[in-house]
Image (cartoon, rainbow, N blue to C red):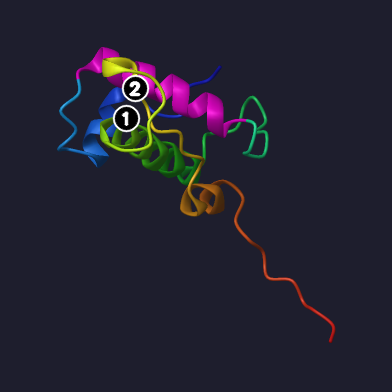
Amino acid sequence: MRTWVTPQDVQAEWPDALLDEEILERLITAAQEVLEPFAPTLPAEAAVPARYQEALILHIREVWRAAERDGDVIGVGEFAVRARSMTDMVKSLLRPKRGKPTLR
């Protein structure tokens, strides 16, 4: 798997993330595994588009926030997470809606 962002990229976009590099690497891997099936496949030689990188960073933040919330959680203690799907913003960065003419 080609990594879309580095821990340093995430920290540059999310400076208040108080996460060490090991945790960020785990979040990057987990979040990217969720996004890759949704995103259009890139040719091997193509650069990773900025919108893919932004979508991944937004999703990493969402996954982290979900883990910190109280309420409807799955698991116990430090292994508890709140299940959340990709937000509409993340989806739209990966698959932008194209204007389509409609017939009425």
Image quadrant in which you'd find residue 37: top right
Q: Which residue is mark 2?
A: 80
Q: Are marks 1 and 2 in contact (CB under 8 Å)?
A: yes
- Judge by depth and name the residue closer to the eye, 24 or 71: 71
Q: Residue 36: image x %, image y %?
A: 59, 30
Q: What kind of secondary structure does the magenta stretch mostly adopt?
A: helix
Q: Quadrant of residue 53?
A: top left
Left or right: residue 84 versus residue 46 is left
Q: Is residue 73 above or below residue 98?
A: above
Image quarter (top left, top right, bottom left or bottom right) of the N terminus: top right
**Residue furthest right as drawn:** 103
Where in the figure is residue 70, as x and y percent of width and height? 27, 36
Query: In what quadrant of the picture does the C terminus appear?
Result: bottom right
Q: Quadrant of residue 63?
A: top left
| Magenta-tinted stretch | 20-36
> Gap between marks 1 and 2, in whole Å?
7 Å
Q: Picture coordinates of residue 93 (x, y %)? A: 52, 50
